[in-house]
Amino acid sequence: MKVGVIGAGTMGQGIAKAFAQIDGYTVALCDIKQEWAEGGKDKIVKGYAKLVEKGKLTQEEVDKITGSITPGLKEDICADCDLIVEAAFEDMTVKQTTFKELDAICKADCIFASNTSSLSITEIGKGVNRPVVGMHFFNPADRMKLIEVIAGVNTPADIVEKIKKISEEIGKTPVQVNEAAGFVVNRILIPMINEAAFIKMEGVSDIEGIDSAMKLGANHPMGPLELGDYVGLDICLAIMDVLYKETGDSKYRACPLIRKMVRGGNLGCKTGKGFYVYNADRTKTAVDKL
Ligand code: 3HC
């Protein structure tokens, strides 16, 4: 099966790896510029090189995986895809436009899926001449086991079933979710990160204290502020804003500290600074003043 992954950023790279690691899957990794698609593939190759250095994978295994990922433009390499997983910028217009363009490029039986983290699948599919389904991966997408499979109002049941089957084929566990802002995981997880930012803002504890408390007290693999940096504070903010806009419920009010950090370009790991500063030697230091 050939999968077109649209968007070669963090999620797109992880999704590309999730498919390419499985025999029988090839990936077209796309972005709006050829060099961005190639940059995404370069990061994938570098990540695997570290695993070879650590003895986790052989060079032969890595060559097989990376050899099945082709970077490029969707108009050049997606015509024969069997499945599209869109992981473009989290913006309704961007996603709608992307699917309308893909409609003209892809063969008729290609399934259209979106990796949106909180937007309406029904609205994403508006004006597209084939159904759109949600296929929501979790970061790091090559290792996290869950895929939320989301049916929009116009998504036929057989498409949902096909995505569940594909999810299982790539070693994931699908959970079917009805359309709702944030679906299941992000509706719980992102408000938790948001609350941690409020706790920091109010001075209840410091960054490391908050993260240690949740790691040791709730057995979370990462603390909420560390996780916010990992997911990207811009993504967390966008999801909070969707939850608030869709429900009108003040419990989803985004923390002003996160909004301020996003405005300042402190987005977390991807910019090298969020609640922590990420050093070149892969260590991190909590930021004193936010
Ligand atoms: N093959 C073989 N070995 C591999 C491998 C691979 N493909 N990838 C990694 N490994 C190895 C590593 O080298 C490492 O080996 P080592 O222990 O000998 O050094 C071992 O496997 C473990 O890898 P890591 O150290 O990277 O992994 P951790 O065990 O520290 O876990 C984590 C990292 C999975 C990120 C964990 O901290 C975690 O689960 N964090 C929470 C993530 C989370 O909540 N994600 C959801 C975010 S929300 C989201 O994505 C939704 C979106 O819409 C916003």
Image: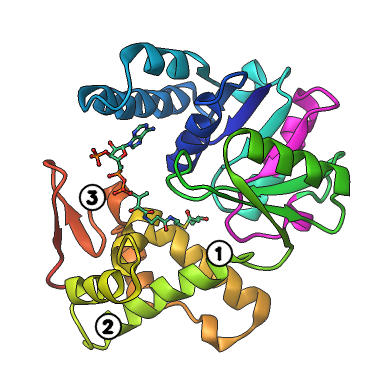
Q: Is residue 116 magenta?
A: yes
Q: Which secondary structure lies at badge 2? A: helix
Q: Does label 1 point to a residue whose CB lies under 8 Å from ligand 1?
A: yes
Q: CA distance from mark 3 to mark 1?
A: 26 Å
**Looking at the image, is mark 3 or mark 1 nearer the viewer?**
1
| Residue at numbered disc 2 | 201
| Residue at numbered disc 3 | 272
Q: Amino acid at mark 3?
A: Gly
Q: Which secondary structure lies at badge 3? A: loop
The quarter of the displayed image where residue 186 is located: bottom right
Q: Around disc 2, counting alpha carbons within 10 Å, would you say few (fewer than 14), some (14 to 19), or many (20 or more)?
A: some
Residue at image coords 76%, 38%: 100
Residue 156 visible? The answer is no
Q: CA distance from mark 1 to mark 2?
A: 24 Å
Left or right: where 140 falls relative to 127: left
Q: Nearer the viewer, residue 259 or 211?
A: 211
Residue at image coords 18%, 78%: 206
Q: Which secondary structure lies at badge 1? A: helix
Q: Find residue 152 and report its horizontal and vertical position in percent.
A: 79, 56
The mark found on residue 185 in the picture is 1
**Tag 1 near tag 2, CB within 8 Å:** no
Q: Which residues are magenta?
A: 97-124
Q: Find residue 215 and report its horizontal and vertical position in percent.
A: 28, 69
Q: Amino acid at mark 2?
A: Met
- The numbered mark, 3 or 1, whose residue comes first in the sequence reads 1
The mark found on residue 90 in the picture is none
Q: CA distance from mark 2 to mark 3?
A: 21 Å
Q: Amino acid at mark 1?
A: Val
